[in-house]
Amino acid sequence: MSVAWIILAVFSILLIWIVFIYNQLVGLRNRFKNAFSQIDVQLRRRYDLIPNLVETSKAYLKHERETLQSVIEARNHALSAMKKASRQAGDGKAMKALGLAEGALGQAMLNFNALTEAYPDLKANQTIAQLTEELSSTENRVAFARQAYNDEVMFYNTQREIFPNIIFSEMFGFHEASLFEIENTQVKEALRIHL
């Protein structure tokens, strides 16, 4: 009878240990999803500011419709990619698509910023200056939120890959999460300088 109790005790400890691993991975997955929701908030703020900036600039940039249109198209594409990534935070394809869309938006904004340099009246406009300042502040918030998300993803991925967690992580559906990386680093640096 004592052998049965020992087997039951070992089985109970093993079951508690597996439940602990499962609960830990659930908590870590929720943390990186929450971190992505902070990126979502800041990106939406930025996406809302860009049309205001373009609209205010139209009066000064009448002959630059192509640049203004490319900014709006890049913004719309990035917004669409962000909505998909929000539904699938950590998914490799969704995060890569968002990174590419953000890179394209960054390039469009870089072109827009270069264009505004050629129009002193536009740079002097109070509304443009305020929108540019808000956009710059938002860019910083996006960078901080992206770093927090990437840190949470790294911690989650590490915990799901260590032994013995790796034995159960795939079995329980805890797949590797992807980092959020903007694909064009040259654009990231240029945006920081111009904004």
Image (spheres, rainbow, N blue to C red):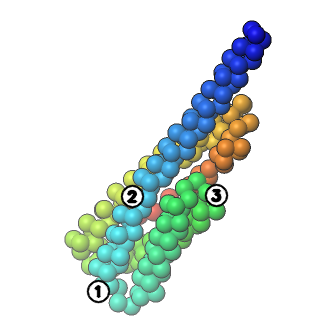
Looking at the rendered structure, the kind of residue marked 1 is Ala
Spot the residue most to the top: 2
- Give the residue at mark 3: 92
Q: Secondary structure at mark 2?
A: helix
**Badge 3 or badge 1: first in the primary sequence:** 1
The kind of secondary structure element at disc 1 is: loop
Query: Quarter of the image holding residue 50?
Result: bottom left
Q: 10 Å neighbourhood of mark 2: few (<14), some, or many (≥20)?
A: some
| 40 shown above or below 151 | below
Please report the residue visible at 71 percent of the width from the left and 44 percent of the height from the top.
170
Mark 3 neighbour density, 10 Å: few (under 14) some (14–19) many (20 or more): some
Between 173 and 194, the residue placed more toward the observer is 173
- At x 30%, y 62%, the residue is 133
The answer to whether residue 5 is left or right of residue 25 is right
Judge from the rendering whether residue 72 lies leftward or rightward of residue 182; answer left or right.
left
Q: Which residue is mark 1?
A: 59
Earlier in the chain: of badge 2 and badge 3, it is 2
Q: Nearer the viewer, residue 123 or 47?
A: 47
Q: Earlier in the sequence, mark 1 or mark 2?
A: 2
Residue under numbered circle 2: 41
Instruction: Measuring from the top left, give residue 10's x and y in whole percent.
Output: 71, 19
Task: Count neighbours of disc 1 (C-alpha within 10 A) and say few if under 14, some if 14 to 19, many if 20 or more.
Answer: few
Res 155 visible: no
Q: Position of residue 20 (x, y in %)?
A: 59, 30
The label shown at residue 78 is none
- Outermost residue, front side: 1
Q: Are marks 1 and 2 in contact (CB under 8 Å)?
A: no
Q: Nearer the viewer, residue 186 or 21?
A: 21
